[in-house]
Image (cartoon, rainbow, N blue to C red):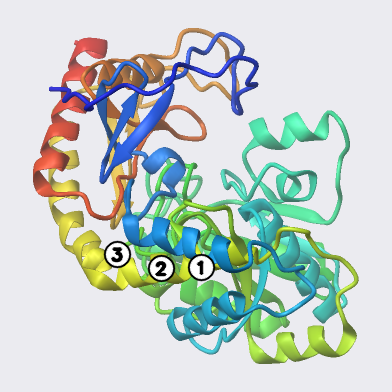
């Protein structure tokens, strides 16, 4: 199945401490990429169906982005984040054209974690309230502030061992698979989940709540989509209780869900929108917060006393402008069209007894696994230790030339290819996943 790269590049770098490491990992050394394919240091090709970390949306080796990076670096490589720059201003204007509603002003940062922290800071300053509500089984970053917003206990507890942060409260997500609610239909679950959220608002005290922060579609938590009119109900609650709504688009932005932003698929306009990853197709780190005019006016009038050295880096902004050009050149349309084929192929996997559910939107999907006799995960690493068959599925798919990610919790496989993916590449990757499931469970 695997193709061969023309020439293998240099070997693995020694001394590197990997992120998200479990101590006994032996990660691939990726040295080259082209489109949906990456190559390791032995020249072996892999279909990158995780887009590395849900971020290389435009695909690997996109020369238009690389050329924009080189051109900007040759003009001026860095301009302080407190000053204006033409590339920075151009990207801000382009983002204003594609963000939903009137989110016309942008504050740049470096990473998605920092973007979410900035959005929360702005919400607190604008409202005068201190609390932020987020969902259990969410992921908003792994810095101290962002980890406190994250509903994933693995991340939250890892950071909390060093220092706890305050001002975040959790509510239950509106899951339709293994749901904490007992509604018989998506509409019923949406109402129950919204009623539960209102209960939390009442018990936390509406005047103490600055914002509700949510991902339009769950990212690492497993591509959960909201049922029925849930987002409209949340928007109505925010309006009723004067709470700001923040959409975390770090993963779902820039075509990942078949539209510019995941919230576009819900027909709701948030008050703030955070982005990262796909804004430059991850060619250079960049993130930010798009805000409504009244919030922007407040920030400009009151001033901002903090900042980040590399926020709105000119080279990154030039990459962002080029990435938007690439997305506009048929990639978002391709993501929307390919999503039907990806869904159809993934749903074929439900014939395996071990597959409990397939869910997602656009080019962001998850395949979850459950014991058919109990309906429970084979192993939930959040609550128990032991050998996890989901790891075996991911490893077996890698041996067949396809890279997939593990969700949070790792009871599921996340499927998130770059946007230029073809039906033929989808077939090859899902065939590899299919065979990996059969090898592991049958």
| Residue 110 image-quadrant placement | bottom right
In the picture, measured across the screen, residue 329 lies left or right of residue 416, that is left
Which residue position is annotated with label 2? 322
- Viewer can see residue 80: yes
In the picture, measured across the screen, residue 253 lies left or right of residue 393, that is right
Tags 2 and 1 in contact by the CB under 8 Å rule? yes
Up/down of 377 relative to 285, above or below: above
Work out whether residue 349 or residue 204 is closer to the camera in this orientation and state it: 349
Which residue position is annotated with label 3? 258
Up/down of 71 relative to 144, above or below: below
- Viewer can see residue 350: no
Give the alpha-carbon distance from disc 2 to disc 1, as whole Å: 6 Å
Numbered disc 3: secondary structure: loop
In the picture, measured across the screen, residue 204 lies left or right of residue 74, that is right
Numbered disc 2: secondary structure: helix
| Residue depicted at 16% across the width and 62% down the height | 337
Up/down of 390 relative to 186, above or below: above
Q: Earlier in the sequence, mark 3 or mark 1?
A: 3
Work out whether residue 176 or residue 325 is closer to the camera in this orientation and state it: 325
Give the alpha-carbon distance from disc 3 to disc 1, as whole Å: 24 Å
Q: Where is residue 157 drawn, in percent x and y?
A: 74, 32
Up/down of 188 relative to 46, above or below: below
Q: Quadrant of the C terminus?
A: top left
| Crowd rating for badge 1 (residues with CA inside 10 Å; few <14, some 14–19, many 20+) | many
Give the alpha-carbon distance from disc 3 to disc 2, as whole Å: 19 Å
């Amino acid at each position: 199945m695997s193709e061969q790269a023309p020439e293998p590049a240099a070997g693995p770098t020694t001394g590197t401490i990997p992120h998200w490491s479990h101590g006994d990992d032996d990660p691939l050394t990726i040295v080259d990429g082209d489109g949906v394919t990456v190559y390791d240091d032995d020249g072996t090709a892999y279909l990158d169906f995780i887009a590395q970390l849900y971020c290389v949306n435009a695909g690997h080796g996109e020369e238009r982005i690389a050329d924009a990076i080189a051109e900007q670096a040759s003009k001026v490589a860095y301009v302080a984040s407190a000053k204006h720059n033409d590339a920075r201003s151009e990207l801000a204007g382009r983002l204003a054209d594609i963000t939903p509603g009137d989110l016309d002003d942008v504050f740049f940062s470096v990473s998605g974690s920092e973007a979410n922290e900035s959005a929360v800071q702005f919400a607190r300053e604008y409202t005068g309230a201190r609390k932020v509500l987020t969902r259990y089984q969410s992921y908003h970053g792994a810095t101290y502030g962002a980890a406190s917003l994250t509903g994933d206990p693995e991340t939250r507890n890892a950071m909390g061992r060093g220092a706890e942060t305050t001002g975040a409260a959790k509510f239950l997500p509106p899951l339709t698979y293994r749901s904490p609610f007992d509604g018989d239909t998506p509409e019923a679950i949406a109402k129950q989940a919204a009623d539960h959220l209102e209960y939390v608002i009442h018990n936390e005290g509406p005047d103490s709540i600055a914002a509700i922060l949510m991902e339009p579609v769950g990212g690492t938590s497993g591509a959960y989509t909201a049922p029925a009119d849930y987002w409209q109900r949340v928007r109505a609650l925010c309006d009723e209780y004067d709470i700001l709504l923040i959409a975390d688009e770090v993963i779902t932005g820039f075509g990942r869900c078949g539209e510019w932003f995941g919230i576009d698929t819900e027909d709701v306009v948030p008050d703030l929108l955070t982005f990262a990853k796909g804004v430059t197709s991850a060619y250079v780190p960049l993130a930010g917060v798009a805000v409504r005019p009244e919030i922007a006016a407040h920030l400009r009038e009151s001033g901002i006393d903090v900042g980040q050295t590399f926020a709105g880096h000119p080279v990154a902004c030039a990459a962002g402008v080029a990435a938007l050009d690439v997305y506009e050149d048929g990639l978002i349309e391709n993501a929307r069209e390919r999503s039907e084929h990806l869904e159809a192929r993934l749903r074929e996997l439900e014939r395996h007894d071990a597959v409990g559910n397939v869910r997602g939107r656009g080019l962001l999907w998850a395949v979850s696994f459950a014991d058919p006799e109990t309906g429970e995960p084979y192993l939930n690493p959040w609550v128990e230790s032991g050998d996890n068959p989901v790891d075996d599925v991911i490893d077996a798919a890698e041996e067949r030339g396809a890279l997939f990610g593990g969700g949070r919790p790792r009871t599921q496989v996340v499927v998130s290819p770059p946007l230029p993916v073809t039906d033929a590449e989808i077939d090859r990757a899902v065939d590899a996943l299919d065979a990996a499931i059969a090898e592991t469970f049958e």
